[in-house]
Image (cartoon, grey):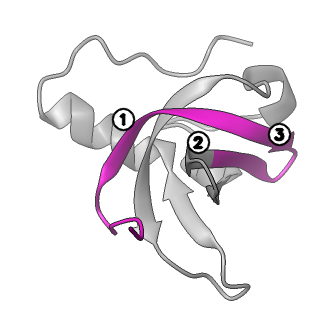
Amino acid sequence: PDPEVGKIYEDCEVMGVHPFGCFVALYPGKEGLVHVSELDVGRVGDVEASFKVGDRIDVKVISLKDQKGKLRLSRKAALIDQEAAGMSEVSSAPAE
């Protein structure tokens, strides 16, 4: 099944870390990009210092296709939604 816009996918594996963001697998065979601006509620200065391949994060699907036909994901939106839902155990990125 295709990913749903607006749905939060939990415990997704970080597949690639780059200065512009992280590639994350929602499930086997379906990856998307979490742009650096969507990684945290605050500014992430150094993506490669904050996230590593193999980390597991929650992400929200914000659109199915960007200009390049890629899935767009947001960790920031997932954090905000989960906090609003009262999931206080959610933590932000590890401190640099």
Q: Which residues are magenta?
A: 1-24
The answer to whether residue 46 shows anywhere in this view is no
Q: Quadrant of residue 67?
A: bottom right
The percent coordinates of residue 29 (x first, y second) are 64, 56
Q: Secondary structure at mark 1?
A: helix
**For mark 1, what is the residue?**
79
Residue 43 in the image: state x and y as whole percent.
63, 38
Assess disc 1: are there few (<14), some (14-19) or many (≥20) residues with their C-alpha within 10 Å of its C-alpha: many
Question: Amino acid type of disc 1?
Answer: Leu
- Cα separation, mark 3 vs mark 2, equals 11 Å
Q: Are marks 3 and 2 in contact (CB under 8 Å)?
A: no
Q: Identify the element where label 3 is drawn.
A: strand
Q: Earlier in the sequence, mark 3 or mark 1?
A: 3
Labelled disc at residue 17: 3
Quick one: label 3, few (<14), some, or many (20+) residues within 10 Å?
A: many
From where the camera sits, is residue 45 visible? yes
